[in-house]
Image (spheres, grey):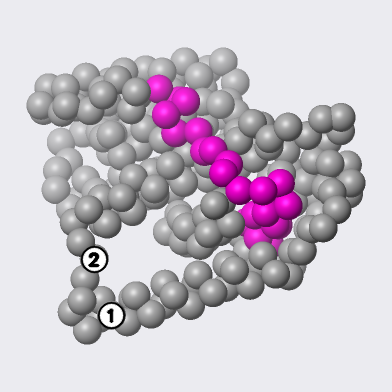
Amino acid sequence: MLAGGLSGREQEEKEFMVIQELCGANAPEDVAQLLDALCASGTILSIPAIFGQWDTGNEETKMLSGIAIDLIKARARTRGSILPDEYFKAKHWKPGWNGSINAFLSYVHVIADICIKAGHDENEVNRIGEIFAEEMNIDMSPYETFADFKICQAGWDLKKDYQVVMDKMAQEELLAEMEDMGIGESIVSLLSGTLMDLQYDYVIARLKLKGSLAYYRFVFKMAESLNQ
């Protein structure tokens, strides 16, 4: 990636690996090295993850992120891209919340519990809740922390909401079986799914989740059933 000159499948595979590492990177030197690679060879697919790191990084990270985005944008324009300028702005990738407050609390718990994979961690739940509340503009007043906000909500049914996500997973498995039988998704559906994955990359980088990017994308896609 640093040397440049990649194309086709090789570019796609190596860039995915860099994006995955960038999403979970914490050390400034690691972030800098990954951003250098994207400066040299990154495509528009890396833009959301870069913005996710930008929002949590130090001044050097923000500077390098800005350089990477400008270089990627210039390369895209050279290749004839007609993407709007909004694509290259952080606010374009920020998630929104359309569901109820109680569903939001369940959403945070589902994301935290499934992503951790090693049992419930209340500190991690609260950390993720704080970030989502900020990103999704959730009004937690008069409470100052997500932990206090959560305790004071009435009528919250995590078990019921968790089942909604489990049902969505079962539906997704059925769709996968249909694809195996040759009944595939439409081009429009595939494009929509790709755009959603990119938005998830922003949030995954914002949360600094280490591990399989494909797995995290799937978790966010399933949990999105609560955001209605």
Q: Earlier in the sequence, mark 1 or mark 2?
A: 1
Seen in the picture, residue 179 relative to 57 is either above or below; the reply is below
The secondary structure making up most of the magenta span is: helix
Q: Residues within 10 Å of mark 1 (few under 14, many from 20)?
A: few
**Whole-percent x and y of residue 127?**
74, 43
Do the residues bearing badges 1 and 2 touch, measured as CB atoms within 8 Å?
Answer: no
Tell me if 8 is positioned left or right of 47 in this view: left
Q: Nearer the viewer, residue 152 or 9?
A: 152
Seen in the picture, residue 222 relative to 174 is either above or below; the reply is above
**Whole-percent x and y of residue 38?**
33, 32
Q: Residues within 10 Å of mark 2 (few under 14, many from 20)?
A: few
Whether 60 is among the magenta residues is no
| Identity of the residue drawn at 70% across and 69% down | 160
Q: Which residue is mark 1?
A: 178
Q: In the rendered structure, which amino acid carries the disc numbered 1?
A: Met
Q: Is residue 185 visible?
A: yes
Whether 108 is among the magenta residues is yes
Q: Nearer the viewer, residue 210 or 167?
A: 167
Secondary structure at numbered mark 1: helix
| Identity of the residue drawn at 57% across and 67% down | 165
Seen in the picture, residue 61 relative to 124 is either above or below; the reply is above
Q: Nearer the viewer, residue 9 or 227?
A: 227
Q: Is residue 212 visible?
A: no
Q: Which residue is mark 2?
A: 185
Q: Image quadrant of residue 79?
A: top left
| Identity of the residue drawn at 72% across and 38% down | 130
The magenta region covers: 89-113
Secondary structure at numbered mark 2: loop
Q: In the rendered structure, which amino acid carries the disc numbered 2?
A: Glu
**Whole-percent x and y of residue 63?**
47, 15
**Whole-percent x and y of residue 187?**
18, 56
Mark 1 → mark 2, Cα distance in angstroms: 9 Å
